[in-house]
Amino acid sequence: MNYLKIIFIVFLSLLAMPNSYGQKDKQKELEERRKIILEEIKQINSLLFKTREEEKSVLSQVEDLNTRIQAIENLIRVTNQQANLLTRNINSNINRITQLREELKVMKKDYAEMVRKSYKSKNQQNRVMFLLSSESFLQAYKRVQYMKQYAAFRKRQGEEINRRTQELQTLNENLIAQKKDKQRLIDENNVSKNQLVKERKKQQELIATLKKDEGTYTAQIRAKQKEADKIEKEIDALIKAAIAEANRKAKESNKATTATSGGFALTAEDKALAASFSSNKGKLPWPVERGMVVKSFGTHRHPQFPNVTTNSSGVEIATNDHEPVRSVFDGTVMSIQKIRGANITVLIQHGDYITVYSNLESVSVKKGDKVKTKQTIGNVAKSATAGKTILKFYIYRNNSKINPADWIYRM
């Protein structure tokens, strides 16, 4: 009956093993996410809160606080998931330790009984007499094999007891480490929660200021959106003109295929480059080495003024002052233009794809230059009014806007 009990316990432990490995993978994934969020918060603090509050508008302060609050909430959520997973791991370890102790208790009892019987048998009849009393050579041979098997079985039992004892010690050590990890996560989460309370209080104070003069601030948001729309229309016009010029040159060279409506007439080389660009979707490098998205692609309802919507054909990336801007892929510089409100804008062609880098203070390339992936093309300009250094980045396929977040790695 004891042997059946051991087999049953071992069977249960084997069933639990895949789940244990799955929990380890999940814990590793959560820890990686937590590190990413911590790095994001670090960037938020250095990129969005480098300017003194008195130098920033209330709207800008609220936007920056929204970004930091969201990051802190994400951090708390992931840390909670980690702590909950550790709790499950700790409970699983406690159950496993209980099983192992029960298993060892049974095994040691059986092993002691086996040793006792062996010793008793040894006193009653020694091995030589046991062999000499055999009725035939075959029987003697079988008795020798039996004694060998019995000795080997005792050895295996002793080794198994040692192995289970070591496993129990390891589990105990893991349990202590996991409890320390859980407490560390709880302590860190408490710090984050306290910070979140302060941030929300500050946010509510700023929002109260906004609500007192809602008309003025909504007018500011709409005026800012109107200016952004004007800049994007100019970029659209630049792209249309650049495509027309590229198609004219391609036609003169007699190397291009027929253009799609409003799109590029591509040469064989252009098609290969476009295919290569397309195959790197989701893997393209960031246009700046260090930065974070502060305005994403598409239409968004303003968090403080629900009746106001904003729209962006690209993304806005906050970065360091004078941060170098780099091409996200191999290509050719199509156009370099100054746009009022957006400083210098650079267009780079990648087959029938175009990447646009707007709000540059200086450029280090010229029209017609071939550029490589991550090659510096200029530096980002700092906004005197917002106190931020923002790169406006767009991706087009022919003359159609596409979401950069789908193309840039972990955007």
Image (spheres, rainbow, N blue to C red):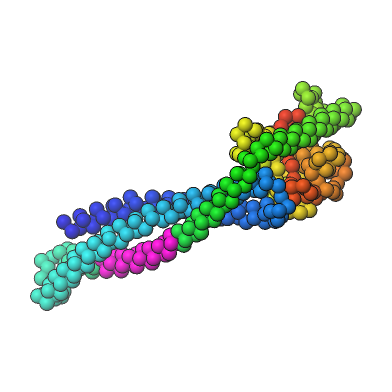
Residue 144 sits above or below residue 90 on the image: below
- Position in image of residue 273 (x %, y %): 75, 37
Q: Residue at x 48, y 53 (%)?
A: 79
Q: Magenta part mainly helix, strand or loop?
A: helix
Membership of 166 in magenta stretch: yes
Q: Relative to 52, is 97 on the left or the right? A: left
Q: Residue at x 64, y 55 (%)?
A: 45
Q: Residue 206 location in percent, x, y?
A: 62, 47
What residue is rendered at 77% in x and 22% in y? 261
The residue lying toward the viewer, choosing from 363 and 408, is: 363
Q: In the picture, residue 101 is in which quadrant? A: bottom left
Q: Is residue 154 above or below residue 302?
A: below
Indicate left or right for 281 with 158 as reference.
right
User: Which of the pair 404/56 is nearer the observer?
Assistant: 56
Where are the magenta residues, as a range?
157-183
Q: Is residue 170 magenta?
A: yes
Considering only vertical position in the picture, is 346 above or below 196?
A: above
Q: Would residue 138 be visible to someone looking at this image?
A: yes
The answer, for residue 395, to whether it is visible in the render is no
Residue sitting nearer the eye, 213 or 269: 213
Q: What residue sits 55% from the left and 51% below the top?
A: 201
Q: Residue furthest front?
A: 212
Q: Quadrant of the C terminus?
A: top right
